[in-house]
Image (cartoon, grey):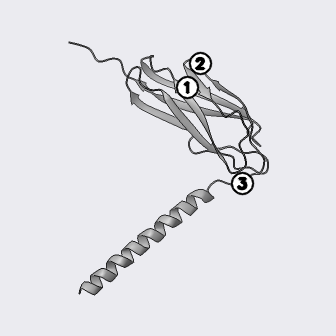
């Protein structure tokens, strides 16, 4: 009886481990290669959710150059002064990851939806619009 239980547990562990590895391979295969420079984002929208007044407004958009040539980002522009993006200054090699940083000024209370426009040499999409959204709560009322 102990041998059957041991065998069953090993079989379940083996199946679980093999499925976990398959999932990672499938995820990597989703990014299609393109000719020239490319820019594929993990997510094109960042949802801050509900955050406190004057909380840390820094977030990151992660992308990969899914092309065959280096990706050069020439400009990153926020839709207003309250949204400040940062971008890599050096070219992103094919297959390499890059990060577009964005800092929202959380001193402004209320809901927000802002955009960051990225200009690059990406084939087929020289400009890419990314979105940030959320709600900044007012300070709690002191009694």
How far across and how far down the image is residue 140, in percent?
29, 18
Which of the image's four quarters has the C terminus? top left
> Residue sitting at 57 percent across and 45 percent down?
42
Question: Could you classify mark 2 by the number of other residues whose Cα lies within 10 Å: few (under 14), some (14-19), or many (20 or more)?
Answer: few
What residue does disc 1 label? Answer: 114
> Residue sitting at 33 percent across and 76 percent down?
9
What residue does disc 3 label? Answer: 33
> Residue sitting at 38 percent across and 78 percent down?
11
Disc 1 and disc 2 in contact, CB within 8 angstroms:
yes
At mark 3, the secondary structure is: loop
Work out whether 29 lies above or below 79: below
What residue does disc 2 label? Answer: 80
Question: For the image shown, how many numbered marks are present on the structure?
Answer: 3
How far is the residue under mark 1 from the one under mark 2? 8 Å
**Which tag, 1 or 2, sits closer to the chain's start?**
2
At mark 2, the secondary structure is: loop
**Extreme-front residue of the structure:** 90
How far is the residue under mark 3 from the one under mark 1? 30 Å
Question: Could you classify mark 3 by the number of other residues whose Cα lies within 10 Å: few (under 14), some (14-19), or many (20 or more)?
Answer: some
């Amino acid at each position: 009886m102990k041998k059957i239980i041991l065998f069953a547990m090993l079989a379940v562990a083996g199946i679980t481990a093999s499925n976990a590895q398959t999932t990672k391979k499938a995820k990597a295969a989703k990014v299609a290669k393109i000719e020239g420079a490319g820019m594929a984002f993990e997510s094109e929208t960042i949802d801050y959710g509900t955050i406190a007044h004057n909380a840390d407004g820094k977030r990151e958009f992660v992308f990969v150059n899914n092309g065959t040539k280096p990706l050069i980002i020439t400009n990153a522009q926020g839709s207003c002064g309250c949204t400040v993006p940062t971008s890599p200054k050096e070219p992103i090699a094919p297959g390499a990851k890059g990060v577009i940083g964005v800092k929202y000024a959380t001193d402004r209370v209320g809901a927000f939806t802002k955009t960051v426009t990225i200009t690059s040499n990406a084939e087929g999409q020289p400009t890419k619009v990314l979105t940030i959204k959320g709600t900044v709560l007012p300070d709690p009322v002191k009694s």
